[in-house]
Each structure stands twice: as structure tokens, then as C-alpha cells.
């Protein structure tokens, strides 16, 4: 089962995908949020290329584990995307995924400017991998 992860932000959406066996997550791309929400050709192409069986969207939570202030917006947008695509949807805690993505990219020597377009897709791959790992146990 191939899962496609979306890290939905106000400006950008990070996209990651699992392998067909659902064991390993990999970053794919970052798309403008408006294109994903409008089901534009760029997002449709990602869906056609990867043929996901499931969407996994990161849901922002506070450090205490409660849904963060953006959670309602993300939940509504993710449900709209899943409904438009006709693909089942699950949510996963995305707490600290962007901070971890920044740390990884910084370790690779990227500047803040160079990271800007990559953080979201790396964060999506991190929370997707966490979700995949939890399903294996």
C-alpha cells in the first residue's frame, strides 16, 4: 500500500511518498498550497505518478499533544483534498517534524535560504516514516 504524505502549510505543501510495500518514506516535492487545494495539474501529476492508496496528512499539535491552532484549517483542507481525489485520509502528529527537517538540512550544509523549498517535503517524509513505522509494530 503506497501512502502519500502532505505537509499542508499556508503557502506550500510538502509531499512525500512511501514505497509500494509501505516501509520507507521519501521526500518528493513542494507545491504551492493553492495548486494542491485547487487540484491543479501539478498536483494531479503527482497523484498520477505515484498512484497512492492513502493520503497521510500532518496535523499540528502542541508540545502537550493537543491540537494546535492551525489544526482545524489543516483538517478541513485535507478532507477537501482527499474528497476531491477520492483517496482515503488519515492524520498523523506532525509535532517537531519541521524543526527536525531543518536540522537535517542544516547538517547537509544548506543555508536557510536554500532550505526554504525543501523543509516541507523533508518534514512530510519524517512524519510519514513515523506513521509507517507505527503500522509495522
Image: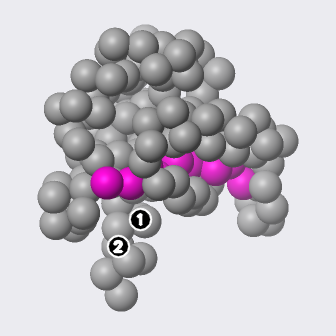
Instruction: Please name the residue shown 29% across and 47% down the image.
Output: 52
Q: Is residue 28 left or right of residue 103?
A: left
Q: Is residue 54 magenta?
A: yes
Q: Position of residue 46 (x, y in %)?
A: 27, 28
Secondary structure state at the residue bearing disc 1: helix
Identify the main secondary structure in magenta. Answer: strand
Q: Position of residue 59 (x, y in %)?
A: 64, 50
Q: Is residue 115 left or right of residue 63?
A: left
Q: Is residue 63 left or right of residue 34?
A: right
Circle 2 is placed at which residue position?
133
Marks 2/1 in contact by CB < 8 Å: the verdict is yes
For the C terminus, which image quadrant?
Answer: bottom left
Q: How many marks?
A: 2
Q: Position of residue 17 (x, y in %)?
A: 28, 46
Which label was assigned to residue 130?
A: 1
For the N terminus, which image quadrant?
Answer: bottom left
Q: Is residue 123 magenta?
A: no
What range of the chain is rendered magenta? 53-61
Mark 1, Cα crowd under 10 Å, few <14 / some 14-19 / many 20+, is some
Instruction: Please name the residue shown 75% across and 65% down the image.
Output: 65
Which label was assigned to residue 26?
A: none
Amino acid at each position: 500500500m503506497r501512502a502519500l504524505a502532505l505537509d499542508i502549510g499556508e503557502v506550500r505543501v510538502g509531499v512525500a511518498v512511501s514505497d509500494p510495500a509501505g516501509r520507507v518514506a521519501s521526500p518528493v516535492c513542494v507545491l504551492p498550497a493553492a495548486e494542491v487545494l485547487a487540484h491543479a495539474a501539478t498536483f494531479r501529476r503527482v497523484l498520477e505518478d505515484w498512484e497512492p492508496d492513502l493520503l497521510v496528512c500532518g496535523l499540528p499539535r502542541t508540545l502537550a499533544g493537543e491540537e494546535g491552532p492551525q489544526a482545524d484549517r489543516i483538517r478541513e483542507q485535507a478532507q477537501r483534498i482527499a474528497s476531491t481525489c477520492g483517496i482515503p485520509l488519515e492524520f498523523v502528529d506532525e509535532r517537531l517534524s519541521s524543526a527536525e527537517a531543518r536540522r537535517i538540512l542544516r547538517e547537509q550544509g544548506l543555508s536557510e535560504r536554500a532550505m526554504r523549498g525543501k523543509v516541507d517535503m523533508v518534514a512530510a517524509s519524517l512524519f510519514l516514516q513515523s506513521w509507517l513505522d507505527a503500522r509495522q509494530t
